[in-house]
Amino acid sequence: MTPSGSFTCRGIQRRPAVGYLTQLEALRYCEVGGFYKNPRFPIWVVGSTSHFTVLFGDFSCLKESKSDELLERCRRAFKEVDGVENGFISRIDLPRVYEILQLDVGGEHAIQTLAASLEVSGADIILWDDFWKATSRLAMGASLQTVLEEQGDSNNAPPKLIQGSVEGMLDLKANPLASAATVESDEEMAKRLAAEWGGGEVVSGPARAASPAAGMSDEEYARKLQAELDAELSGTASVVAVSGSPPRDDDISTQQGTSPGDPESKEEDQKLVATLKNDANDTSNNPVDTKPADFEKFGDSFPVYHYNGLRGGTLTPFRVTRLSAEEAVGSSIALGGQAAGGGGDLEDVIRTKWPSCMIDWLGNSPPYID
């Protein structure tokens, strides 16, 4: 209690035997401290708006990687300087944060250079997200020069809307009237790409009118080009007639070197159709159906159980797969660990403990915590 009569609340000073997670943190009303999230035993009481449930697992739940330990150290150092937890610090406070972390980045001049790179333009502040991305890379062995180059690339990458190099863009800024001559039309871009890739001449305009395709509609011309391309890929000459209707079966049979009534051709077609149907029904060779898209790299996976004493008692097993240490370093992670935009269900509560984790409910519906 301070002389003014106000109270200063502090968390516990060591790890408890049983941890605690709450729905209120997922809803961004409060934050559970690191000691309660990392108890001595893999058991957590989960608080909701109406009662308490239990989350537990084996000791693999408590296993921490180097990136986990680094994240907790950086959070504590950043919050010690950012006393009210605004999510940012003043630029001049960056040396103090690195002093708390005992992280040597190359002296005072190097820290000031890094601060200038991380500073929000014109605001004289450094956001937690930018601080974590740079500091985690430095702590894992990246050089200051590499971090500065990555920061510069992300901040200063010019949009590639105009043909030419950065120097050409600077010339355009100096002479805005030259923009009309610099920006390519669709037709000019098509001609340039055809020349670069060694393709044929792009037919358009007057040349199109004088070509054999004159008088055709766009649809008919597209069909002709598609037929020629198919013929080239199959190694045969195109004999499909270009018209406003699809090619006839006898045209296709003639193109393949078989007669319309050839029994061998019909038998081959039937085998092909059967094969295509089997491939469509077989999902074993379809990576999209068997595993999630590889947007992120995941690491350790471990079993967890949730027990709700209401409704006759419900025990729900599931698996949690965490981000790999390589993926966590340099990625965006919230300062407090709250699930961004979370609705307060069990998945959001779990992600206050394991940010950005993947949860497999093993074919069951996510359980209620109310």
Image: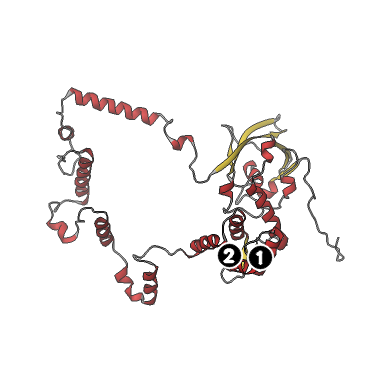
Displayed quadrant of residue 20: top right
Which kind of residue does numbered mark 2 sit on?
Answer: Leu
Displayed quadrant of residue 280: top left
Query: Left of 242 or right of it: where is 129?
Result: right
The quadrant of the image that shows the C terminus is top right
Instruction: Identify the residue at image location x=57%, y=54%.
Output: 330
The quadrant of the image that shows the N terminus is bottom right
Instruction: Identify the residue at image location x=65%, y=68%.
Output: 108
Q: Which element is circle 1 on? A: helix
**To which residue does mark 2 refer?**
118
Q: Which element is circle 2 on? A: helix
State if disc 2 and disc 1 touch (CB < 8 Å): yes
* Residue 320 location (% of width, % of height): 61, 38
Which kind of residue does numbered mark 1 sit on?
Answer: Leu
Q: How is the image coloured?
A: secondary structure
Query: Left of 294 or right of it: where is 224?
Result: left
Which numbered disc flags the more N-terminal residue, 1 or 2?
1
